[in-house]
Image: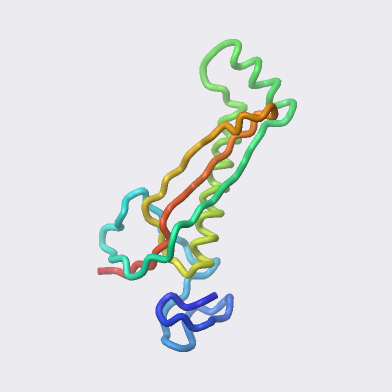
Amino acid sequence: MKCWKCGAEVEPNARFCHNCGAPIASATTDIMVTTTPTIPGYKITKILGIVTGLTPRTRGVLGKFVAGIQSMFGGEVTAFTTEIEKAREEALERLKAKARSMGANAVVGLDIETSDLGLQAGVVLISATGTAVVVEPE
């Protein structure tokens, strides 16, 4: 991994750059994520690039059976609700992991999309996309 400030190579679990002393985002650092292009109270000091977290999901045979019965009566198909929620969280975690690996401490402009891949297996794709950035308090 490289330091976001000076570009020096840093150890994977380093908390600070040995060259310039800048804080390094790590796997234990929580990444701020927002759908807005800015974060109130912070200024963007570096734009690192686009990051995406993807997760395709499908229901098993039993889940499809339960969903089929629920769809006959109308209303929410709870058999899919939990899977979609899990997929959303997984896509966000993958997005944050990629941002961390780039040296980011925040992601701005988050967009989450759901797509049906149109396969007979009923695969749904959840994608989380945003811009990895380094922010500092104003």
Q: Looking at the picture, tell me which residue is in the foreground, 69 or 133.
A: 133
From the top left corner, tell me how far across and down residue 21 is, in percent. Answer: 42, 85
- Rendered position, 19 above or below 98: below
Residue 120, image x and y in percent?
69, 26
On screen, residue 97 above or below 83: below
Residue visible at 68% across and 24% down? 64
Q: Nearer the viewer, residue 72 or 103?
A: 103
Q: Is residue 131 left or right of residue 120?
A: left
Q: Quadrant of residue 60?
A: top right
Q: Position of residue 106 (x, y in %)?
A: 41, 61
Total residue callouts: 0
Q: Residue furthest front?
A: 118
Identify the residue shown where x is 54% and y is 81%.
10
Q: Is residue 132 left or right of residue 116?
A: left
> In the picture shown, does residue 12 fall above or below 89?
below
In this picture the colour scheme is rainbow
Residue 91 in the figure: left or right of residue 137: right
The quadrant the N terminus occupies is bottom right
Q: Quadrant of the C terminus?
A: bottom left
Q: Residue furthest top?
A: 73
Measured as percent of width and height from the top left, residue 107 is found at 41, 58
Q: Residue at x 58, y 26 (%)?
A: 78
Q: Residue at x 45, y 57 (%)?
A: 50
For this orientation, the residue located farthest to the bottom is 19
